[in-house]
Structure formats: structure tokens, C-alpha cells
Image (cartoon, rainbow, N blue to C red):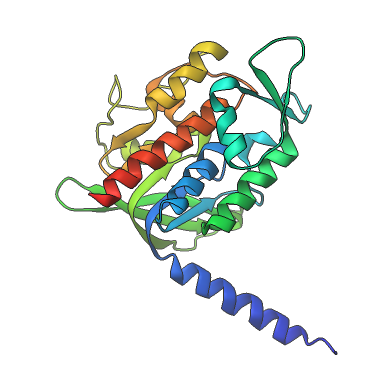
Amino acid sequence: MPLDELVITRAIMESYMDKFLGSLDSDVAIVGAGPAGLVCAYYLAQGGASVAIYERKLSVGGGIWGGGAMFNQVVIQEEAKRILDDMEISYMPYEKEEGYYLVDAVELSCALGLKAVRAGVKIFNLFTVVDVKVVGEEERVSGLVLSWTPVEMAGLHVDPITVGAKYVVDGTGHDAEVARVIQDKLGKRLNTPTGKVVGEKSMWAEFGEKSVPECTGEVYPGLFVIGMAATACYGTHRMGPIFGGMLLSGEKAAKMLLERLKG
């Protein structure tokens, strides 16, 4: 069969627009397709929620790909191993010490993305969130303002577009970019010890891994923080190339959000 370049173009554009317009007003919009964001999205979709992820980069997986110092292996601790089992991701115990499990970073990145998409999550890469949509006197977060990442990189003066969501999740990692919009643009107080993004502390894996799920939650009306964004907001310790806390954070946020959506 001969191939027609115009048919190929039309097929891509029509199907993409159908997907985007179908996600124009989601139950949950997640910013960042890192480990916490992908896990959160997966469990939300499994629970029946409509979920869209907006990822700044070309690929999903966040900081997983490089492992530790470009050795593309990561560690998961005992508490989070059940999530790997749930998602059918392979791992092997570290023979020299109990409670540590090694996961291939490439498999983990690919598997989390695949499981999320197959659960019904819509992932839109190359989008940068430049602002939030707010509603009501309390200026509750009700969506996102988006620009193409290449537009932002080039410094072009192009107006953004808006998507709606019942809840927004900040999974932007160390920078906690959405929470900073609330702090800097709206001048609002966050639900943190200082009312602002505190900033992460130095490396302490044991404390950092425990605190990530603990800090996961609603930091401002309509806005939840997960993963390293939660670490940055609440000023806890970073933990390096161990990812169990990220997975547990995503799972916890999904449970909390599903309860809110049911209510």
C-alpha cells in the first residue's frame, strides 16, 4: 500500500487534538511525570479518576533514568517493594544487605510510564506550566496555564493556554514549581512551617525517605505536593538514588485524592 505523508500528518494531528480536548477538564492534573507523578496517576486512574500529566521534558521518568551518578540502577527499600509487585516490575535483592532491592532504572522508567498509560492516564510531554488557574474568593487552584517547552526555551512572546482540573498535583521535583507560583504570583501562604517553600535540606536518606510520604498532601486549596516537591516545600532532607519514598508518596496522594473526589 502506498503511503501518503498528508494522511500521516492528519492522523497525528486529529488524534492528538482528540486526546488533548478530552483532557481539557480532568479530575486531576499532575505536573511532572517523575516516579511520584506516574505512580500517583496510575492509582488514580485505577480508581476511576480522569488524569492528565503535563511533563516539561521529552521523556517521562524524571530523575530515574540516570540512576546514581549515571550508573543506571536504583534502590527500592522493603516498604515500597509491594508497589513494584503491583506493577509487575522486576527487581533483585542486594545480596550483601537485607531490605535493599535493585531495579534497572530504564525498566523502572519505562514500566511506570507504560502502566500509567495503559491504566488510562493521558500524558502530554513538552509542556511547561507557567501559572495556575484559580477560582473563588479563596483563589483555589482549579487548573493550569500551559506553554510549549520549546516556546519557553526560545523566549518567544506567545500567549499560553489553560486546562481545568478538580485538583492539581505538583510533582515537579526539587524546584516545587507550582507551589512557588502560589507563593510568588498569588502571594498566598502555603501549609508549611514558614508559609513558603522551605527548601530541601542536605542528604540524609533514612530521614528523607520517611518524610516524603509524611509530607505528601494538600499544601494549598486544590494543590497537592508529592515526591521531591513535598521535600522542598516542607524543608526535609534529600535522599539520593533510592526511590521507594517517591513511589509511596504517589500512592498516598492518589488515595487522598480519590477520597476527595468521592466526597
Report x, y in % for residue 185.
32, 42
Residue at point 73%, 41% (across, down): 107
104 up-or-down from 237: above or below: below
Report x, y in % for residue 53.
50, 52
Position of residue 176 in the picture relative to residue 263 (left or right): right
Quarter of the image with the N terminus is bottom right
Res. 14 image quadrant:
bottom right
Res. 75 image quadrant:
top right
Report x, y in % for residue 206.
54, 12
Position of residue 71 in the picture relative to residue 136 (left or right): right
Report x, y in % for residue 57.
62, 48
43 up-or-down from 76: above or below: below
Residue at point 66%, 18% (across, down): 100
Res. 197 image quadrant:
top left
Residue at point 47%, 37% (across, down): 250
Front position in the image: 143 or 97:
97
